[in-house]
Amino acid sequence: MKSVVLLSLFLAAMFHSAAQTGDQQVETGEELTGTQEGTADHGEVSARIHTHFNWSLNRQDPSTTFEVKRAYFGYSRQLDQHFSGEVKLDIGSPDDVSEYSLIRRYTYFKNAYIAYSNGKFKSWFGLFDMLQFKLQEKFWDYRYIYRSYMDQYRFGPSADLGLGIQYRLSGSLTADVIISNGEGYQNLQFDDVYKVGTGITFELVEDLTIRGYYTVHTSVDPQMCLSGFVGYRLEKFRFAGECVLQKNYRFNKDHNRYGYSLYATYTLSDRWEFFARYDQVYSNILPEDQNPWNLADDGSAIVSGVQFKPVEPVRISFNYQDWVEYAQNGDIQPFVYLNFELNF
């Protein structure tokens, strides 16, 4: 029922916007020429490759590894002034954490959607990037080194099948709503359970951004997630912080996860940047237990380093990363990384 209502709103808004455009053109006597319809093109092919070399600083396991973590290949096209579409393939390892999964490579559709935009209104239908942490990912801007907080610790999928709507209420306020399968882009929907998310973004001044987002994944014990983000840009600095609370993880009642991330970047020049980040992720203690229910995955992370751009499509980073498990006998995993990204 929710999906039917949201789809109806989407179609109504789209036809209303199209009618307004048509009326304006009739009133002014304009003809719908190819140039006036705008930006139809022959499309654009894109690719992005993430690869690295890492060296473990753990004396008990001083390993070294060359890896290609991810490769994206896509095609996008602006169909006319309002409609566009994109198809993108994601080639990488599956998300399960078994030691054997890391040596396999699978190809998924990361994106396969049609988009519509008209003035303050934007919408997506199909398999598209979720808005839950898209803003944070852009602000962090080092996805090829370390994923953004909610993506890294699996608070939600980066892309999913569904319908998304975004509307700019004023010059400084934008609202969005999404209904999706909830299983992510690597899995098919296997039930009649949907995930609904809504967010609001404030840009109070030119360089300050504040965003809040809430999702509920419907079930007997619905999984809910509430997140907040604040980011600030100066001439050469940018700072950001985000916090997350997730209740009933994977529909397990009272199994909650929460944490925060802080990060900053200093831009020395067009080619050189220095960055640092600190994460913490926790789980709660259930009444019948003495330790957090997800203690094996609770911990803190540090990422710090330098980035160099020799040419525009290429980014290179030398950085330090570690993960400290909170369990009493947990591991400390320090690494030195040399990361490369090619994006064209």
Image (spheres, rainbow, N blue to C red):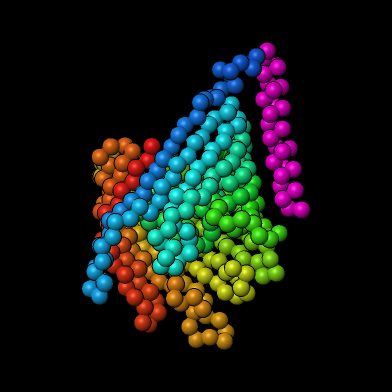
Residue 59 seen from this side: yes
Q: Is residue 308 left or right of residue 180?
A: left
Residue with the most extreme right position = 1
Q: What segment is highlighted magenta in the picture?
A: 1-29
- Pick the front one: 28 or 32: 32
Q: Overall secondary structure of the magenta stretch?
A: helix
Numbered label tally: 0
Taking the spot 35% from the left edge, 59% from the top edge, the residue there is 277
For residue 328, above or below residue 223: below
Magenta stretch containing residue 24, yes or no? yes
- Image coords of residue 62 (percent x, y): 24, 69
Q: Is residue 173 left or right of residue 323?
A: right
Which of the 4 image quarters holds residue 214? bottom right
Taking the spot 64% from the left edge, 17% from the top edge, the residue there is 32
- Image coords of residue 22 (percent x, y): 69, 23
Taking the spot 76% from the left edge, 53% from the top edge, the residue there is 1
